[in-house]
Amino acid sequence: MLEVSGLSKKFGGFTAVSEVSFKLQEGEILGLIGPNGSGKSTTFNLIAGLHAPSSGSVRFAGEEIAGLAPAAVCHRGIARTFQIPRPFRKLSLLENVAIAAFYGQNQKISRAKAYAAAADALALVQLPGGADARVEGLGAAGLKKLELARALATQPKLLLADESLGGLDHAEMEQAADMLAMIRREQGITIIWVEHIMGVLMRVVDRCIVLDHGEVIAQGQPVEVAHDPKVIEVYLGTDAAEVQQTVAQRAA
């Protein structure tokens, strides 16, 4: 579905992403992990069209999309969430998501269809779709769900989920991870997930890619990555044993 080849991005003299390459199969959940500043969000931005690459290729469903504007990328079937939700706070939840349905799909749709798509997306993430449901009543978990609903309303084939667990307590994290797994299972949406909470991510993803200083240092199944000496050294550190236990429990 997605093939990234030799992807690099320089900001002046700083190289944020260097020669990143990977392939994504339809139906996978791929974890993109690494320390702060390792290039994860920049890689997302390059795929989603927020930045044009300095070099390299991004092919989606066989089409080169590197350098396309974000709207053009979204219209081809790639949606993303952001680490910090920025909803339209004066609008209802339904209106927030309907805007995504109107402008994120690669077709003109009626108001009725946009609002129906918005209601479906809100129901999928377990948020109320009534006209009186407002943004002001949402906590951190609710805002993350709203961000996800807006992405889903664009009818994506590929979802880029950027730190969906930030600011959540443990129970909310588990619920958010289960929701991503459910979206893949019930909607058939392929997912790339950037996340720092390894214990939760590792029990959901099929494969992981690990970045450090903008370069891929490891990739493979969770059990392989969790035991990779370089990944333990630069990223997992003292959390390695807990992550390895999570992976072992999943395998069992």
Image: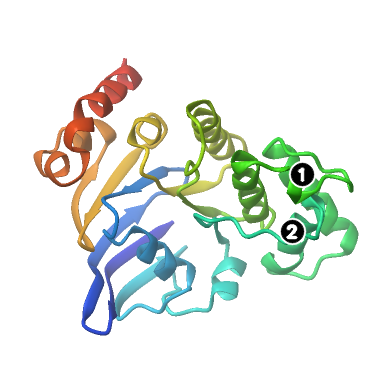
According to the picture, the residue beneath numbered tag 2 turns out to be 89
Three-letter code, disc 2: Arg
Q: Position of residue 29 (x, y in %)?
A: 43, 42
The quadrant in which residue 62 appears is bottom left
Secondary-structure class at tag 1: helix
Three-letter code, disc 1: Asp
Query: Seen in the image, is 251 located left or right of residue 110?
Result: left
Residue under the image location 82 percent in, 65 percent down: 109
Out of 78 and 167, give the one closest to the viewer.
167
Q: How many marks?
A: 2
Mark linked to residue 208: none
Would you place residue 128 above or below residue 81 in this image? above
* Of pointers 2 and 1, the one earlier in the residue sequence: 2
Would you place residue 179 above or below residue 217 in this image? above
Quadrant housing the N terminus: bottom left
Residue under the image location 24 percent in, 54 percent down: 211
Q: Around disc 1, counting alpha carbons within 10 Å, would you say few (fewer than 14), some (14 to 19), or many (20 or more)?
A: some
Q: CA distance from mark 2 to mark 1?
A: 20 Å
Q: Position of residue 8 (x, y in %)?
A: 27, 73
Residue under the image location 14 percent in, 38 percent down: 228
The residue at the far top in this view is 252
Q: Position of residue 245 (x, y in %)?
A: 26, 21
According to the picture, the residue beneath numbered tag 1 turns out to be 120
Secondary-structure class at tag 2: loop
Quadrant housing the C terminus: top left
Q: Position of residue 64 (x, y in %)?
A: 42, 74
Query: Seen in the image, is 78 located left or right of residue 223?
Result: right
